[in-house]
Amino acid sequence: MIVYLSLDILILALGLFFAKNRLRVGKREVNSRCWFFILSSIVLIFISSFRGDFSSDYSGYVDMYNRYMRYPLDSILSRGLFTYPEKGYLLFQYFVKEIFGDPIYLFIFSSILIVVANMLHLFKYTKDDVLAVMLFLEAGVYYSSFNLMRQAMAAAIVVLGSKYLYERRVIPYLIIIIVASLVHTTALVMIPFYFLCTIRVGKKNIILYVVMFAAIALLLPYGVSFVQGYYWEWYNTSTAVGYSWKNIVLPASIAGFAIVNYLVNRSDYEDDINSKTRIVTEKHNIFGNSKKTVSVDLNVIWLNATFLYLTFYLLGLQLRMAQRFASFFSLYAICFYANQVTKSKYRDIIVLATIILLIAFGYITKTDFPYYFIWSK
């Protein structure tokens, strides 16, 4: 618990330091935001890379490394698309083994991928740096990656492909999703999201959402049984239960505030050109160059992602496994919430309340989740 609280305090201290101090190298002023994200990323990578064997999946990844360490490359490449573990992760593991020969590098490089991908996106699309990073710790995939490493790696690859989602470039986006699904198959949930994410939400959509959620909740056990006929048959869902209500307090608060705040003030956001990103692409062909400008409302994409983030967390009350899918929408929900807060006239109060909630949530949910470094035991 001390490590988790110390990490929160360190992020807050770095944020306050760079907010109040303008750094200079000679006569040149240094970008304080960059340094905040760089130093925060280094700390987060270090804590994640050298964590000990205290999570249920840690030893499983080491065992998987030892089990497949003599697998030749051609055997990995010839595996089917829906085999376990996925061939993309086994390729990652294969190159780690060939180059470094030590499973610790699985955790080092996976941590670099997860942290860097998410922090780059937060740096580009959020304005309150401390709030964004704190949300990534508690409401994002950071701590959950200690257990669900492959899932978090796949989600990080999806985040890296967000550019194509925002630019509405379906082919490169689908390629990114397929690559992510080779690390964890659940990434395929992001394919339908591409076509659904620009739907504008109104009162009728809200009613439809509630009805659809109720139907999904009722049919979830049957759906899982059907899927297990083809995949995930190794999970014993007959005894699976949901998690405690404590697990949804934070995601429900974040998603609920962001959704309600946006819908109440939607007319203001739709008139705000800063909420839209304009992408200009050039195409070169024998007839000359052509330019295409796409205007995308990021708030609409993030709103739909936040609905799904909340949906999968709520379904986790019935079946814990459902929360896995929320990982792919968490960063979009974080960006949505952080930007809604930034535009609020009660910004400072909400930011303070959120940080207190994040720290309290971390304390309550990690009382039975110790931390020690790999060299400690």
Image: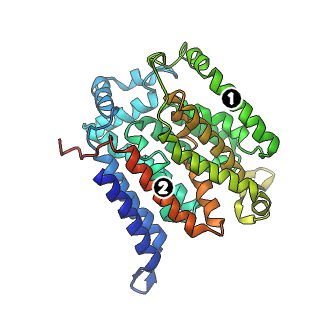
Q: Secondary structure at mark 2?
A: helix
Q: Residue at x 80, y 44 (%)?
A: 203
In the current view of this chain or complex, which residue is farthest to the bottom? Answer: 27
Q: Residue furthest top?
A: 229
The front one of 148 and 169 is: 148
Mark 1 surroundings: few (<14), some (14-19) or many (≥20) residues within 10 A: few
Q: Nearer the viewer, residue 42 or 367?
A: 367
Does residue 371 lie above or below 315 as drawn? below
Circle count: 2
User: Can residue 297 be seen in the rendering of this structure?
Assistant: no
Position in image of residue 213 (x %, y %): 68, 32
Mark 1 or mark 2, which has the lower sequence index? 1
Residue 267 in the image: state x and y as whole percent.
Answer: 80, 60
Inspect this view and state whether residue 224 appears: yes
**Position of 350 relative to 201 (above/below):** below
Residue type at the position of mark 1: Ala
Residue at x-position 52% and y-position 59%: 354
Residue at 64% in and 60% down: 340
Horizontal side of residue 298 vs 121, given as left or right: right
**Image position, residue 128 (x, y; %):** 54, 65
Residue 292 found in image quarter: bottom right
Q: Which mark is residue 166?
A: none
Instruction: Examine the rendered structure and indicate whether residue 256 appears above or below residue 55.
Output: below
Identify the secondary structure beneath mark 1: helix
Question: In whole angstroms, how far apart are the C-alphas of marks 1 and 2?
Answer: 28 Å
User: Which of the labelled discs sits on residue 214, or is there none?
Assistant: 1
What residue is pinned by disc 2? 357
Q: Amino acid at mark 2?
A: Leu
Badge 2: residue crowd in 10 Å (few <14, some 14–19, many ≥20): some
**Colouring style:** rainbow
